[in-house]
Image (cartoon, rainbow, N blue to C red):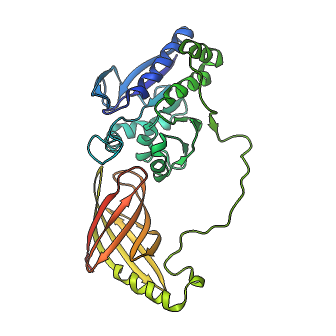
C-alpha cells in the first residue's frame, strides 16, 4: 500500500493541505484502497491551527521519515506584507526551526520516499538548507527568496526533480496531487479523479530531461568591484572612490534584526590595491563578502548565511564615523535593519 503523509504545522495554508488530501482520498476509492492518506505533524498527534482564521485540524499521526510513500508539505497562510509574527516569512521560519527540518532531511535521503510540496512548502525545506542546488518552484511571491536559499527556481506549475516534486501557487496542490497519482498509480486512476472533480491538471510538468530550449547569449559582466572597471575611470575618479571606500575600513560589530531573530555578525573590511575586500564572521563561520561595490557613498555586497536558516542576503550600508547602518534583504523577506560600531 502507498502511504501519503500530509504534514501540518502551525500556520499552514488550508487549501495547500486539503486539496491534495481530497485528491489522494478519491484516488484511494478508485484504486481499491491501494493508498492511505493521513495528516501528521513532526510532534505527533495533535490539533494544528491553520493560518486562515485559526481553524484547527486534527493530525492523527507522527511524521515517519522512513515510511515508504509520499510526504507532502504545504505552505503557510498569513500576512503577505510586513515582518510581524503573523507574516508568512515568520510562520515559515518558525516551522523551519522545529523538528520538521531534520525529519524532512531524513525523508529526502530515503530512496523509497517522494517528498512533495505545495506553494510555500518548498520554502520550508529550502530555508532549512534542504534544497540547495535543486530545481524547485513556489508561489510567485517567493521565487526570489527560493533562489536566495540556494535552490534553483523554475517558473513552472509543477517541477519534478525525482524524489522531490514541488508545486507553485496555492491551487497547485490539485496539480501536484494529480501528478503524483498518475506517477505512482497510473494515468487511468488520475483521469478518474479529474473527472470526479471536473478539474484538469494545468501546465507542463517540468523535468530536467530531453532537449533544452535554445538561448541567445548576450554580452554582460559581473557587478564590478570598486576598481575593476579601471578603463571607465581616470585616475582622479579612482582615487576618489578609494578614499570614499576607506571610511568602511576596519572591524565592525554588527547586529541584523531579521523577522526570524537577531544575527550577530562581525565584519572586517579593507581596501587594498584599489579593491574592496572583506569577510563576515557569524559564530565560528567566516565567509568572504561577494561582489562588494561602492555606489553613492554606500557599500553593497552579497553574503550567504547559514543561521538561523540558509539565505543569500544582499546588503547596503552607510558609514558615519565609527557607526554603520543599512539593510539586508532576501527575496520577499522584509528588509532587515543592520546597525553596528567600528571596533578597530
Q: Position of residue 232 (x, y in %)?
A: 58, 82
| Rendered position, 244 above or below 259 | below
| Image vertical order of residue 329 relative to residue 199, above or below | below
Q: How many marks?
A: 0
Residues 211 and 283: in front is 211
Q: Position of residue 61 (x, y in %)?
A: 35, 22
Q: Is residue 280 left or right of residue 176?
A: left
> For residue 125, what is the image quadrant?
top left
Q: Depth check: 207 or 78 in front?
A: 78
Residue depicted at 38% across the width and 31% down the height: 13
The quarter holding residue 181 reads top right
User: From what the image shows, is residue 283 above or below residue 180?
Assistant: below
Residue 277 horizontal/vertical position (percent):
44, 76
Q: Quadrant of the C terminus?
A: bottom left
Q: Residue at x 39, y 40 (%)?
A: 102
Closer to the camera in the image, 7 or 77: 77
- Say left or right for 333 vs 165: left
Q: Position of residue 339 (x, y in %)?
A: 27, 67
Q: Is residue 304 above or below residue 13?
A: below
Quadrant in the picture for residue 342: bottom left
Amino acid at each position: 500500500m502507498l502511504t501519503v503523509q500530509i504534514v501540518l504545522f502551525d500556520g499552514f495554508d488550508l487549501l495547500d493541505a486539503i486539496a491534495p488530501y481530497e485528491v489522494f482520498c478519491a484516488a484511494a476509492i478508485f484504486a481499491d484502497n491501494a493508498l492511505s492518506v493521513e495528516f501528521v505533524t513532526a510532534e505527533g498527534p495533535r490539533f494544528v491551527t491553520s493560518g486562515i482564521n485559526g481553524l484547527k485540524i486534527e493530525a492523527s499521526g507522527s511524521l515517519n521519515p522512513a515510511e515508504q510513500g509520499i510526504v507532502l508539505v504545504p505552505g503557510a497562510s498569513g500576512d503577505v506584507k510586513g515582518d510581524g509574527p503573523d507574516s508568512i516569512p515568520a510562520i515559515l521560519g518558525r516551522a523551519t526551526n522545529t523538528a520538521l527540518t531534520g525529519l524532512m532531511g531524513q525523508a529526502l535521503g530515503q530512496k523509497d520516499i517522494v517528498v512533495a510540496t505545495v506553494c510555500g512548502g518548498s520554502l520550508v525545506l529550502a530555508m532549512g538548507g534542504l534544497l540547495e542546488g535543486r530545481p524547485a518552484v513556489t508561489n510567485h511571491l517567493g521565487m526570489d527568496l527560493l533562489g536566495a536559499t540556494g535552490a534553483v527556481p523554475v517558473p513552472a506549475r509543477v517541477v519534478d526533480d525525482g524524489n522531490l516534486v514541488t508545486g507553485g501557487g496555492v491551487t497547485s496542490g490539485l496539480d501536484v496531487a494529480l501528478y503524483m497519482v498518475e506517477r505512482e498509480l497510473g494515468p487511468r486512476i488520475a483521469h478518474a479523479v479529474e473527472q470526479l472533480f471536473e478539474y484538469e491538471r494545468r501546465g507542463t510538468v517540468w523535468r530536467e530531461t530531453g532537449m533544452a530550449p535554445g538561448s541567445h547569449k548576450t554580452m554582460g559582466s559581473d557587478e564590478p568591484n570598486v576598481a575593476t572597471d579601471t578603463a571607465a575611470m581616470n585616475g582622479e575618479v579612482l582615487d576618489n572612490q578609494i578614499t570614499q571606500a576607506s571610511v568602511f575600513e576596519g572591524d565592525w560589530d554588527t547586529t541584523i534584526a531579521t523577522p526570524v531573530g537577531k544575527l550577530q555578525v562581525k565584519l572586517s573590511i579593507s581596501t587594498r590595491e584599489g579593491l574592496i575586500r572583506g569577510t563576515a564572521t557569524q559564530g565560528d563561520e567566516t565567509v568572504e563578502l561577494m561582489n562588494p561595490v561602492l555606489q553613492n557613498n554606500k557599500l553593497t555586497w552579497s553574503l550567504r548565511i547559514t543561521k538561523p536558516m540558509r539565505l543569500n542576503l544582499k546588503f547596503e550600508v552607510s558609514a558615519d564615523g565609527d557607526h554603520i547602518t543599512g539593510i539586508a534583504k532576501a527575496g520577499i523577506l522584509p528588509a532587515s535593519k543592520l546597525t553596528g560600531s567600528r571596533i578597530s
